[in-house]
């Protein structure tokens, strides 16, 4: 079984990241990622460019977007749905998730317990809990592995996995190539029988739960399954 | 060059989590639009900033103790109002940045990051301000839209 290293939550200057699409892909290459998902806040205008850089540098780039709503942040991967993030409310979020999934995209919840309003609006998920049964994947660990909020999200992930078969992913929420001194970061490893995969195959592996959250450098499992 | 829209508006706490729309019409085709957007204040300097941030940390951390330094690192709290552009009900792009002084170009030959390239044809457009965070009693916003032939 091959463990293909991915970072599934990244930002560029198309939203509030420091990376250009080129420098993001270059950093991904430097860190040994097989692939990344570009998930800029409320826009996918950088996706085509990032895919081109990915082809040149040998990094698989998954099209994506982070619906950065007032009530929670939702990562949508696949690039098929073109849902206007401004239309998403607590009352229709399930409908929007189902619409994205019907288009072929997969949908996940980002940093479920991050510090929320007014520090980071929507950082902590405030959508109705009912929506959790409709997502494909869940950022069980986000940002720095030691963050206290990850204990809560890991606990919730196990509950979701048991109830709905939700997949676990890690999301660095990667905005720049600067690591905080002393911090440790993870990665999502996709477990594939193939050495090389396509975007669609990557989406399928995430959806099917063929994921492992591991240390960014050595890949050691950091989430007990 | 022709000035299409120029306005000043006040955003209040009652508009938190609202999308405020400012429609405009182009009666002819242009090569590009330039949008200039500024709002202030960005920083919230009220005495209750620490308390509000502390409460946000407590809600996120649950049973885990919140360290004072963690809270202080998030101060001053910020007003955060992003701008997006709509053409005929379709989202052209969003400037989800933390800067409060932004210039955006939208045109067929290329657009500022966050926005799709677009034929600036005649039609119905709208600037939309999305109020992600408002802590000050009033935030003053200025929007200017200029079209180029």
Image (cartoon, coloured by chain):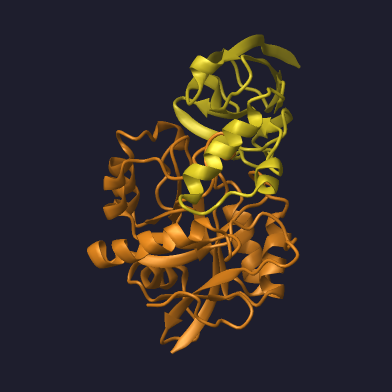
Chain colours: A orange, B yellow
> Where does residue A83 sit, x and y in percent of width and height?
41, 41
Whether residue A165 is visible, yes or no, is yes
For this orientation, the residue located farthest to the bottom is A1
Number of marks drawn:
0
Q: In which image quadrant can residue A28 be found?
A: bottom right
Residue at (70, 36) in percent of width and height: B75
Q: In which image quadrant can residue A146 be found?
A: bottom right
In the rendered image, which quarter contains the C terminus of chain B?
top right
> Where does residue B63 sit, x and y in percent of width and height?
46, 52
Q: Nearer the viewer, residue A202 or A221?
A: A221
- Relative vertical location of residue B129 with respect to residue A171 in this rendering, above or below: above
> Where does residue B51 sit, x and y in percent of width and height?
60, 32
In the rendered image, which quarter contains the N terminus of chain B?
top right
Q: Nearer the viewer, residue A32 or A52?
A: A32
Please state if B88 lies on the left or on the right of A204 as rendered: right
- Relative vertical location of residue B149 with respect to residue A157 in this rendering, above or below: above
- Relative vertical location of residue B14 with respect to residue A24 in this rendering, above or below: above
Residue at (43, 37) in percent of width and height: A71
Please state if A165 lies on the left or on the right of A107 as rendered: left
Q: In which image quadrant can residue B105 be found?
A: top right
> Where does residue A19 sit, x and y in percent of width and height?
71, 55
Residue at (72, 74) in percent of width and height: A30
Residue at (47, 62) in percent of width and height: A151
């Amino acid at each position: 079984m091959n463990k293909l290293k991915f970072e599934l939550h990244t930002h560029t200057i198309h939203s509030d990241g420091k990376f250009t699409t080129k420098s993001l892909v270059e950093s991904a290459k430097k860190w040994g990622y097989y692939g990344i998902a570009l998930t800029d806040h409320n826009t996918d205008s950088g996706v085509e460019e990032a895919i081109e850089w990915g082809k040149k540098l040998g990094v698989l780039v998954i099209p994506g977007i982070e619906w950065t709503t007032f009530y929670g942040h939702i990562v949508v991967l696949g690039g098929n749905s073109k849902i206007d993030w401004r239309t998403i409310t607590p009352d229709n979020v399930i409908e929007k998730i189902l619409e994205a999934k019907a288009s072929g995209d997969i949908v996940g919840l980002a940093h479920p317990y991050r510090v929320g309003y007014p520090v980071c609006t929507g950082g902590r998920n405030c959508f109705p809990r009912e929506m959790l049964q409709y997502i494909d994947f869940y950022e069980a660990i986000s940002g720095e592995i030691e963050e206290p909020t990850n204990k809560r999200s890991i606990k919730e992930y196990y509950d979701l996995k048991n109830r709905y078969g939700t997949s676990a992913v890690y999301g660095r929420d990667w905005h720049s190539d600067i690591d905080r001194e002393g911090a440790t970061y993870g990665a999502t490893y996709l477990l594939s029988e193939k050495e090389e995969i396509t975007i669609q195959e990557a989406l399928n592996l995430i959806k099917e739960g063929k994921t492992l959250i591991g240390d960014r450098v050595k890949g050691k499992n950091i989430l007990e399954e | 060059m022709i000035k299409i829209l120029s306005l000043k508006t006040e955003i209040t706490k009652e508009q938190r989590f609202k999308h405020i729309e400012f429609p405009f019409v182009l009666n002819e085709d242009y090569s590009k639009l330039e949008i200039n957007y500024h709002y202030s204040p960005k920083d919230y300097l009220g005495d209750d900033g620490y308390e509000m941030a502390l409460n946000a940390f407590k809600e996120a951390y649950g049973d885990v103790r919140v360290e004072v330094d963690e809270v202080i690192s998030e101060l001053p709290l910020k007003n955060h109002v992003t701008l997006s552009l709509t053409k005929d009900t379709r989202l052209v792009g969003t400037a989800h940045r933390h800067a409060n002084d932004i210039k955006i170009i939208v045109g067929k030959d290329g657009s500022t990051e966050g926005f799709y390239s677009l034929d600036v044809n005649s039609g119905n457009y709208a600037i939309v301000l999305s109020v992600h965070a408002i802590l000050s009693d009033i935030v003053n916003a200025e929007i200017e839209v200029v079209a180029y032939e």
